[in-house]
Image (tube, rainbow, N blue to C red):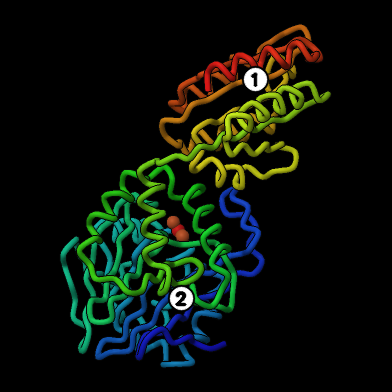
C-alpha cells in the first residue's frame, strides 16, 4: 500500500473502508475513507489517524515514505474514534511524539484512552513551526464534537478540515478532478444532512473564521480532497448552514393497506401541480438517511402513517426520531394518514413535527379507504394553502 502525494513532502496516508455500510444508522452505500496526512519537514507530522482496525493500512502507507517511529507531532483535529482510533498504537511505536490538540481535544483523548501522553495545547490563532512550513489552528467546537478544530498550512494553502467538507466515499481516487463530480457532491450533501446539519450555526461561524485563509486545497478526513471545486463546496456549505430551501416538497410515508399511500399521492400531485420538485418516498423502500439528503433543502416535509395499535407504524417513528435529532430548521410540515376506529396517528405525527420546530400547515385523516371525494378534498385544501 502506497502513500499518495498531495504536494511535495505532503502525503495522504489514510485507509479505505470499502465495506462500511452503516455509520450510526447512516447508510453508507459507497463505503468511506479515514484520511490521515503525513508532512515531511524538520518536524515529521501526522494529521489525524484512522479507525483502530485500519491501523495496519495507515502504517503501511506511512512506511512507504518514512519510518513511523520518526513522527514528531500528531495533530488531533477531532477525538472521535474514526480519526483517533490508531493513536494508541502510534504512541506505542513513537512514544516521544507530541500530540497537538485543543483543550477539549486533550480532555477527550484522555477520557477515551486514559494515557499520559505528551500534549501541546493550541487555541485559535496559534501556530507551530515545522521547519520550512508551519501550521495554524482554528477551533471549531461542535462541527461535530466539542473538540473539532481546523488545521491550515499557509505555505501550501491547504486546509485540513477534518469532518467538515467530508463525504463517506471509498475510492482509490483522492482528488475531486479524478472522480465524478456529481457523486462527490451528492455524498457531501448526504454527509452534511446526516452528520453536520444539527451544528449549522457552528458551521457558519467556522466559515467566517476560515474566510480570511487563502485556501487552495481542502483535505477533509473522509472521502475526496477538494482542489478543483472549492468554490462550489464552500457555496453549498453556506447554503446548507444558513438553512436555505428550494421549491421542494418531500412526501414521506408508510402504509398498511395503501390508504395512506393514496393520500400521499394526492398530496404529491398537488405540489407537482404547483410546480414543486416533489419526490414521494415510501419508507419501505427508502432509507431514512437518503430521505434526509432530500430534506436538506426542502421547504415542505409531509409525513404519513396509518394508525397501528393506537400509534404510528414503527418505520415512521424511526424516521421521525432521526429527523428530530438532526433538526432541520424552519420547515413547513403536513401530517396525514388513514385509520380504522382510532385516529391516533395524526396527533402523534403532529407532536413529533411540532417538537422539531416545524410550522404545521395541514393535517389530513381519512377513515378506512379514501375515495375520490376524500382525495379531492385533500387536494383542494392543500391547493389553497400552498
Ligand atoms: Fe469523522 Fe466526527 O468523525
Residue at mark 2: 89
Residue 263 or 79: which is nearer the viewer? Answer: 263
Q: Position of residue 320 (x, y in %)?
A: 58, 31
Quarter location, residue 149: bottom left
Local secondary structure at mark 2: helix
Quarter location, residue 106: bottom left
Q: Residue at x 53, y 18 (%)?
A: 385
Question: For residue 336, which numbered disc appears in the image?
Answer: 1
Q: Which residue is drawn at 40% across and 74% down?
A: 227
Q: Where is residue 8 in the image (x, y as percent from the top left)?
A: 35, 91
Q: Where is residue 77 in the image (x, y as percent from the top left)?
A: 34, 65
Q: Position of residue 237 (x, y in %)?
A: 39, 53
Q: Residue at x 55, y 57 (%)?
A: 186
Tell me if residue 16 comes above or below residue 299 in the rendering: below
N-terminal of the pair, mark 2 or mark 1, is 2
The answer to whether residue 81 shows anywhere in this view is no
Locate the N terminus and report the quarter of the image it occupies: bottom right
| Classed neighbour count for the residue bearing mark 1: other residues with Cα under 10 Å, few (<14), some (14–19), many (≥20) | many
Amino acid at each position: 500500500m502506497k502513500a499518495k502525494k498531495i504536494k511535495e513532502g505532503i502525503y495522504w496516508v489514510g485507509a479505505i473502508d470499502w465495506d462500511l455500510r452503516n455509520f450510526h444508522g447512516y447508510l453508507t452505500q459507497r463505503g468511506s475513507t479515514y484520511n490521515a496526512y503525513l508532512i515531511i519537514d524538520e518536524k515529521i507530522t501526522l494529521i489525524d489517524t484512522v479507525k483502530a482496525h485500519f491501523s495496519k493500512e495507515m502504517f503501511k502507507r506511512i512506511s512507504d515514505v518514512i519510518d513511523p517511529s520518526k513522527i514528531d507531532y500528531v495533530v488531533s483535529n477531532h477525538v472521535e474514534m474514526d480519526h483517533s482510533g490508531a493513536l494508541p498504537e502510534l504512541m506505542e511505536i513513537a512514544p516521544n511524539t507530541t500530540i497537538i490538540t485543543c483543550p477539549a481535544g486533550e480532555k477527550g483523548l484522555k477520557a477515551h484512552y486514559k494515557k499520559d501522553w505528551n500534549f501541546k495545547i493550541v487555541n485559535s490563532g496559534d501556530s507551530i513551526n515545522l521547519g520550512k512550513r508551519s501550521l495554524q489552528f482554528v477551533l471549531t467546537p461542535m462541527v461535530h464534537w466539542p473538540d473539532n478544530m481546523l488545521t491550515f498550512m499557509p505555505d501550501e494553502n491547504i486546509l485540513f478540515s477534518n469532518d467538515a467538507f467530508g463525504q463517506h466515499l471509498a475510492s482509490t481516487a483522492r482528488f475531486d478532478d479524478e472522480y465524478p463530480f456529481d457523486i462527490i457532491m451528492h455524498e457531501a450533501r448526504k454527509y452534511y444532512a446526516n452528520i453536520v446539519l444539527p451544528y449549522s450555526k457552528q458551521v457558519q461561524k467556522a466559515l467566517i473564521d476560515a474566510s480570511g485563509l487563502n485556501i487552495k486545497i481542502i483535505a477533509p478526513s473522509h472521502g475526496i480532497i477538494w482542489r478543483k471545486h472549492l468554490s462550489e463546496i464552500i457555496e453549498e456549505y453556506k447554503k446548507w448552514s444558513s438553512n436555505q430551501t428550494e421549491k421542494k416538497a418531500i412526501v414521506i410515508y408508510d402504509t398498511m393497506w395503501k390508504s395512506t399511500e393514496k393520500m400521499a399521492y394526492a398530496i404529491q400531485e398537488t405540489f407537482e401541480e404547483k410546480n414543486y420538485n416533489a419526490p414521494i418516498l415510501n419508507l419501505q423502500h427508502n432509507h431514512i438517511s437518503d430521505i434526509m439528503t432530500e430534506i436538506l433543502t426542502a421547504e415542505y416535509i409531509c409525513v404519513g402513517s396509518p394508525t397501528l395499535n393506537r400509534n404510528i407504524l414503527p418505520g415512521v417513528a424511526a424516521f421521525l426520531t432521526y429527523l428530530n435529532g438532526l433538526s432541520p430548521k424552519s420547515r413547513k410540515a403536513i401530517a396525514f394518514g388513514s385509520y380504522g376506529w382510532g385516529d391516533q396517528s395524526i396527533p402523534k405525527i403532529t407532536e413529533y413535527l411540532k417538537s422539531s420546530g416545524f410550522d404545521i400547515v395541514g393535517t389530513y385523516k381519512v377513515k378506512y379507504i379514501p375515495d375520490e371525494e376524500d382525495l379531492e378534498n385533500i387536494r383542494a385544501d392543500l391547493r389553497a394553502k400552498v
